[in-house]
Each structure stands twice: as structure tokens, then as C-alpha cells.
Amino acid sequence: MINFEKWHGNGNDFAIINSIENKIKLNKSFIRKTADRNKGIGFDQLIHIGLPTKHDYDFFIRFYNSDGSEAGMCLNGIRCAAKYIWNNNLFPLGQIEIQTRRKNLKCSPKNKNNVSVLIDSPIEMQTPDLEHNTIKKVLGDDFFLSHTGNNHLCVKKKSIDRVNLEELYKNLENVLKKYECNLSIFKKNKGLIQIRTYENGTGETLSCGSAALCVAAKFLADNKNSLKISSIGGELEFSFHEDVILMSGPTNFIYKGNVNE
């Protein structure tokens, strides 16, 4: 039996396990089975907490999509993982240095349920002209590609509520899967930025922290001290902190249990 805890950050939900005391090897069939919302636990991603591979970090955390594929990083998930670590007395309440597959992050408690994450600003993602032109034919000109541990295609829209996001994703699926790229649409109306995201290996989620970061970084560059990004699941707050970006958002424990390996 494998012990787990179920958490969510703005509705982006996770099953968290750790192999610090007992080594746990994961395979795709186990992940897909437990991700099933009718026959398993049900989650957007499975979070695996392990020991670091470098001495100057505290933990190594991996993220697995519901189809069994591995994501590079997850900002909603990293907050929940940090809160799990503190709640289970795996580390003193304070800043945690965390390794992930693609980014190294610093997590700190903010208040009762909120956690802050320090992360480098996203960088522009480069694609060959052929793929860029394919995207342009479907979307027009108002989009950008960004990398922040995960790859994101972010599309500005006048309205996002009635857009068939799954259909839009499928129109670009070959390119998006080739580059492990998630798709987001966003709308800016004065001080409010709203966003929806379709994640590779999962589908549309109620919130995606790394997508929100990519969009936030574009507007933080316009001399803004801080801003909020709103998704279906809730809000995330972003601000500049010296030469990196500080993201703050909620974490919520749902329940704990165990599942057959």
C-alpha cells in the first residue's frame, strides 16, 4: 500500500506521495490508474517527493501528468508539496530549497494556507519557422511562446469564456506535443488578467501556475510592482523580487489515504 495525501492549489489537484522513508518506484500504468476520477483517486498530477541529488538542496520533487508523462515543473504543485513537507514535519517551517526536473525553486510560508515561490523570470521559447508559421495560421499574430520549466503558448483574446479550448488545442496538437507545450488563452481588462490553460497530458485545469507566471511576466515588465492572474479556480499574485519573480498562492489539504501499488 502507498500512502498519499490529496491537495489542491486553486482547484489544480494533486496526489502527493513521498519516498523519503520507503523507496517508491512509479510507472505509467500505476499513474494512469490512480489518476482516473471514476476508478482511482483522481488528480491533475501526481507529485513525488524524494531526497535531493545535490547537497545544497533539501528535496527533489517530480511531477507526473494524469496520462503518466512527466512534467518539467508545476508551480501550483510545488506550493502544495512545500505545505505537505511542513505539515508532515519533514523540514522546519521556513524556506525550502527544492530541485525539480527543470527548475530549482525556493518556497516559503506566507500565512496559514498561502505559500510563496521564488522563480527566475520566464524566457522566450524559440521554434523553427515551420512550426511558428503553423501556429500563426491558426492563431494570427497575438501570441507568444515562453519557457519557465514548462513550455507555454500564450494567446491573447478579447474574450476567453466561450472559447472551445480543447478544440483549439487539437488544431495545434502536433506542434504542442512535439515541444511539450501547454496552451493558454488570456484576456486583459484594465487591472484584471483572466486565463484558461490546457495542459499536455492532463487537459484543461482550473489553474496553471507556470502559465500564469508566463503571462504575468509580460505585464510585470511594464513597470508594474505586482499583479494578479485570475483563473477558474482562483487567483495568484506575482511581483518582482530583486532579479526574480515572487509568486504567492493558496494550498488546500483535502484528505489522506492509501492505494494499492
Image: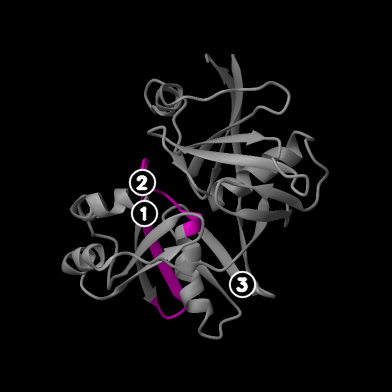
Q: Is residue 255 above or below residue 136?
A: above
User: The residue tagged with tag 2: helix, strand or loop?
Assistant: loop
Q: Could you say where residue 93 lies in the image, as x and y percent from the top left?
A: 81, 47
Tell me if 142 is positioned left or right of 96 in this view: left
Q: Is residue 2 visible?
A: yes
Residue at numbered disc 1: 181
- Image quadrant holding the N terminus, namely top right
Question: Where is residue 188, by image quadrant?
Answer: bottom left
Residue at numbered disc 3: 239
Q: CA distance from mark 3 to mark 2?
A: 27 Å
Q: CA distance from mark 2 to mark 1?
A: 7 Å
Tell me if 84 is positioned left or right of 216 in this view: right
Viewer-side label of 3, 2: 2
Q: Amino acid at mark 2?
A: Asn
Q: Could you say where residue 173 lies in the image, as x and y percent from the top left?
A: 24, 50
Q: Is residue 23 above or below residue 229?
A: above
Q: Amino acid at mark 3?
A: Ser
Residue at numbered disc 2: 200
Question: Where is residue 248, by image quadrant?
Answer: bottom right
* Magenta residue span: 189-210
Do the residues bearing badges 2 and 1 touch, measured as CB atoms within 8 Å?
yes
